[in-house]
Image (cartoon, rainbow, N blue to C red):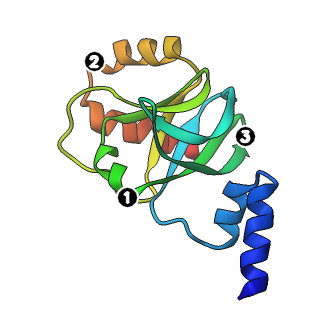
Amino acid sequence: MRNILFAFALLLALGAATNAHALLGLFENNYRVVFDAVPDIKDDRIYLGEAVMGDITKRELKGSNVVLTVDVKKEFLGNMVDTTVFVAEGGRLKHATLGPSAAPLKEGANVLGFTDALHLNLFKAKAAMNDLGDYLRKKADELAR
């Protein structure tokens, strides 16, 4: 037990908190944020305003798309709804919504990500004429393939 605690402390000291978290299997509330291009994200945390709502636990390249697996803290699960999206801003991954929602997202769901606010706003204009929640999930699932 002492060795495990020492290894965990060493990983944290080396700045590998996310990797240590993954190594110990502590993820509980995973979602997949799907981008159609590489986002400029330098921070391994995800944000709701200035609050840290979770961590990026995995980064994958799937063809020309990027998929980030994120672990959302329990207290923020209510913010993960069918109109949730994420946007890369200032080197951070930030939570956003595209409108009111009625349906919570299931764990493991694909969530659409945007490389910047401009792409998010262009998407909002296109999505205004569709059933927003359904449209977002279909688009994210399509990119995740």
**93 over 72 or under it: above or below:** above
Tell me, for residue 11, which label it has, or none. Answer: none
| First reached walking from the N terminus: tag 3 or tag 2 | 3
Q: Name the secondary structure under disc 3.
A: loop
Q: How far apart are marks 1 and 3 (CA)?
A: 32 Å
Q: Which residue is drawn at 34% across and 54% down?
A: 75
Residue 128: mark in rendering: 2
Q: What element carries label 1?
A: helix
Rendered location of residue 87, percent (x, y): 51, 27
- Answer few, some or many: residues within 10 Å of disc 3's Cα (few below 14, many 20 plus, some between 14 and 19): few
Q: Position of residue 69 (x, y in %)?
A: 58, 51
From the image, tell me which residue sits under label 1: 74
Characterize the local packing of mark 2: few (<14), some (14-19) or many (20 or more) Cα atoms within 10 angstroms. few
Instruction: Between residue 90 and residue 108, name the one nearer to us.
Output: 90
Badge 1 amino acid: Lys
Q: Which of marks 1 and 3 is in front?
A: 1
Amino acid type of the residue tagged 3 in the rendering? Gly
